[in-house]
Image (cartoon, rainbow, N blue to C red):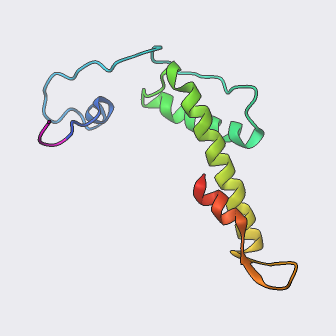
Amino acid sequence: MARGRKPKPVELQKALGNPGKRALPEPVLLAGRTTELRAPLRLPEEAQNVWNELVPVLASVGMLDGVDAVALEGLCILVARARQAQEHVDHHGLLLISDKGKLSPNPMVKVERDS
């Protein structure tokens, strides 16, 4: 069993200026680093907006790998859903009045939390 601290990611060590001055290992690249990934055509508009926010940031710090596209697509969809649910909760509140006139929790709170 390994002991001690987990090593910092290579990207973080480079960003900090490699304070230990030790040789940094080369990261494992499966599909190769890239500076641009196109959003999948099937992404909803809100998820494409999230994609357009994240991809430039990841590319600028050198953390964009072609193999990550599927995981990035899923992340964008979840963030878009969470934002939509948050807007609904902001507009309608945490509690809703049911058909019988009783207060009930807004179901969008669960959607937001789960996303």
Q: Is residue 4 magenta?
A: yes
- From the viewer's perspective, is residue 82 above or below residue 90? above
Q: Residue at x 71, y 69 (%)?
A: 90
**Between residues 11 and 6, which one lies in front from this camera angle?**
6
Q: Which residues are magenta?
A: 1-5
Task: Assign the magenta stretch its main secondary structure.
Answer: loop
| Image location (x, y in percent) of residue 83 | 67, 54
- From the viewer's perspective, is residue 92 above or below residue 34? below
Using residue 93 as the reference point, say whether residue 78 is left or right of it. left
Q: Residue at x 48, y 22 (%)?
A: 65
| Image location (x, y in percent) of residue 60 | 47, 30
| Image location (x, y in percent) of residue 71 | 55, 32
Q: Is residue 16 magenta?
A: no
Q: Residue at x 84, y 85 (%)?
A: 101
Query: Residue pushed farthest front?
Result: 100
Query: Residue pushed farthest top?
Result: 31
- From the viewer's perspective, is residue 99 above or below residue 49? below
Task: State the count of labels.
Answer: 0
